[in-house]
Structures are given as C-alpha cells and as structure tokens.
Image (cartoon, coloured by chain):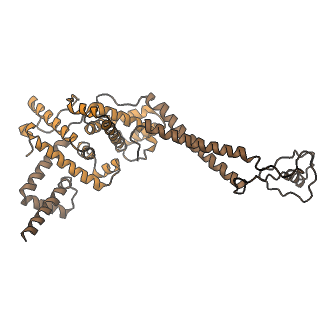
Amino acid sequence: MTMAFFRRNIDEHRWVQERLSLYLDGRLDPDERARVEAHLRACVSCARSWETLAWTVRAVRALPRVPAPFPLAVRPEQVAPASLGASTLRWAAWAMAAAFVLLLGLDLIVTGGRLAAPTSEATPAGPAIARQRGLSEQAAPSPAPLFGLAVPEATPTPAPMAPAATPPPAPAPLASPVRFLELALLLGAIGLLALDRWRGRRGRPPGLRG
Amino acid sequence: MTLPLPPADESRLIEAARSGDLEAFNALIRRYQDRLYNLAYRIMGDHDSAADAVQEALIAAFRGIRSFRGGSFQAWLARIVTNACYDELRRRRRRPQASLEALFVVDQGPEAEWTLPPVEGPETYVENRELAELLHQALQSLPEDQRVVLVLADVEGYSYEEIAEILRVPVGTVKSRLSRARMRARDFLLAHRELLPGIRRPP
C-alpha cells in the first residue's frame, strides 16, 4: 500500500517534470495543464524545479543577439566556376545515360532482341521500293533501307548498283560500332557520375542534404 | 537593426537570385545576416567557427536556391546554416585542437548589451555580461542536438513546427530535445550559481 503510494507519487513527479517545458510554452491541453498546476501547488520540489527552469528560459531568451562582425555576402569567385562545373557534369552524365538507353533500345528492336545476332539489313529492299514507286532502276540511287520494312520480291531483277545478288551479309557488320558506342556511352555516364560524386564529397558546401 | 523586407520585394529578389543574380542574393542576405550569424555563433560557440559555418552556408544557399520551394525564406536559410554548423562541428571533432582553443580562448565578440530590465549603470552592465557569458557556456555544455534545438527555440524564437521543418525531425523529437536541453541548461546554471550576480541568481 505504502510502496504503491510512493511509486504513484514518483511517477507523478516524473510526469510533471517531463511536461514543464511544454507547460512553459503553453503546449499542454487543458486537462494536462490543470494536472501540472495542481501538482506544482502541492509539491515544493517540483515547484522549485519549475521556477528555476522558467528563470533559465527567460534568461536564454533575453540573450543579446550577436551581430555579424562583418557584412555577410557571397563573392562571385566563390560560386561561379564550381556551380557551373558541377551542374554541367551532372547534365552530361544523365544525357549520356539517356543516349545509352535510347540506343540500346533501338538496337534491341532492330536486332529483334538478340544482342549477338546479325542484323537483317534486307539489302534487296532498295530496288524493291524503287520499283514499287515506279522509278526506273537507273534513277534510283539504291538507298539502303533504314528499318528493313520492305519485303523482298520473289524474282528480284538484278540491280547493278545494289548488291542484291550477293549472299547474306556477314554476321553483324554494323553491330560492332553500335555496340562500341553503347559501351562508350555507358562507361562515360558512369565515369561522369562517379566524378560528380567525388567532387561533391570533396567540395560541396553543406546544407543541401535532405 | 535590419527590418524584414516587404514580401513582394523579397519574392522579386528571390526570383532574381534564382536566375543567378548574386547581387540580389546578397541583398537578401543583408536582411537576415545578424540572425543567421547569431544562430551560428550560439551553436558553434566561437566567432571563427561561426564565420566559417555561415560563409559555407551562404555559398550552399546560393548554389541551391533553385531548391527553395517557397514558404519562409528565413527558415530555409536557417536550415542551411544549421546543417553547415553540424558539418563544421563534425570537422572540429576530427581536429580536436580546434575545440580546445574554443574552450580556452576568452571570446571578445561584439556582445550587445543585456536587455533584461532594469539596465542601469556600468555595474549592471558588467553583471549582465557575466550572466551572458555564463549562459553562453551553458549552451556550449549541451549535447549538439539539444543545443541546436534550444538555440532555434529560445534564442531565435522559432516555433516547434518551424524547428521540425528546419531539422527535418518530428515535432515530438523537438519537444523532447528542447525539454532535456532546458533542464540541462538550468542544471548548469545552478551548478555555477556562485558566478552569478546576486540580483540575477536563479530563485
């Protein structure tokens, strides 16, 4: 019985102590405020704690403001080169990454998703298109088809300027430079991002973290 | 003493600063410079560190002004200054001799006069300087997180919600840190009550 009384009393002291700061700022709801005030009226120790705490906060709030000892300003040389360099670097990295994704996507579409397969260039399509449009074979400059959409005819007439009669092209003659470009873009983007992060860790001013 | 800018002027300067106008940015900073410096000084504890932190913060603020999404520009600046102070404190921990200097060098900063009434005569002024010095020491005795919250709340007068926004922590964290900070500062003053002039001793 007595122990329970003391424990309840200690709990009440602690409960009040933990709320004195909020009480001081008027941030307790009416019930809590009434409970704190009732306790402060009855408990000399907590009342003393409250007085000294309120005194301290009043004193801190009255601390004089220390003015800047010199006019604060940012000089042009402190911001111009670094900010330009950093943003340019980041833009370049993301542009390269975007170009890589775009190129890879096109590459996969063209090769039908087979990264190692030869590209079907459909070389006889050039004269086929020319014929379909009613142009003479002499006038047609035998353009290489861009997307390989034209269907080769069953009996293609031999065209002097187009290698229509030649056997199928060697495996992936155009893929290698494209793949090389993709790899270069990917490595470039990764390299620029790494450089940006490294520069950021070294030289980025504080304050812009989340 | 600086006066707050009319909102329209401030918006115009912010817009100019966002497009890279450094003069406009510096014009904004001039309005807040004493508050920003005081914030850094009370967190850092000495003028050299405060000046370093504020300067870093202003450069960061100019570079990052495009990330300012409206609201209180002053609170946005306070957040950047506070983060710069945290960074500076971290650097100081890596260079322990700097903190020793800060402990032993008596600060001769431009303390303004004590503003608690009544302020009359040189004796009162000396008393007040003593109290201001002791309060400053009390702030420095606090753990960093508690000191920052106490400075933002009771020195700079920000609300719980503003502090939560500045520090990106929940309001409940602000409340508990502030409560502990005030208790601790009170205990520091009580432990050094013999240094306080009689008239201003804690009751």
Q: Tell me, yes or no, if residue B30 can be seen here.
A: no
The chain that appears orange in the image is: B
Q: Could you tell whether A89 is left or right of B91 in the image?
A: right
Q: Is residue B170 left or right of residue B109?
A: right
When asked about the image quadrant of residue A79, the answer is: top left
* Camera-nearest residue between B34 and A77: A77
Position of residue B113 relative to residue A9, above or below, is above
Q: Nearer the viewer, residue A30 or A208?
A: A208
Say which residue appears at 23% left-offset and 42% top-offset.
B155
Residue in front for this viewpoint, B55 or A163? A163
Could you tell whether B42 is left or right of B75 in the image? left
Residue A81 in sight in this render: yes
Identify the colour of chain A in the image. brown
Residue B81 horizontal/vertical position (percent): 34, 39
Question: For residue A93, what is the image quadrant?
Answer: top right
Give the percent coordinates (x, y) of residue A143.
84, 46
For the N terminus of chain A, which image quadrant?
A: bottom left
Q: Is residue A162 above or below residue B196?
A: below
Pinpoint residue B69: horizontal percent, then vertical percent.
Answer: 43, 47
Residue at x 8% of width, y 36% of height:
B197
Residue drawn at x 8%, y 55% as measured from the top left: A45
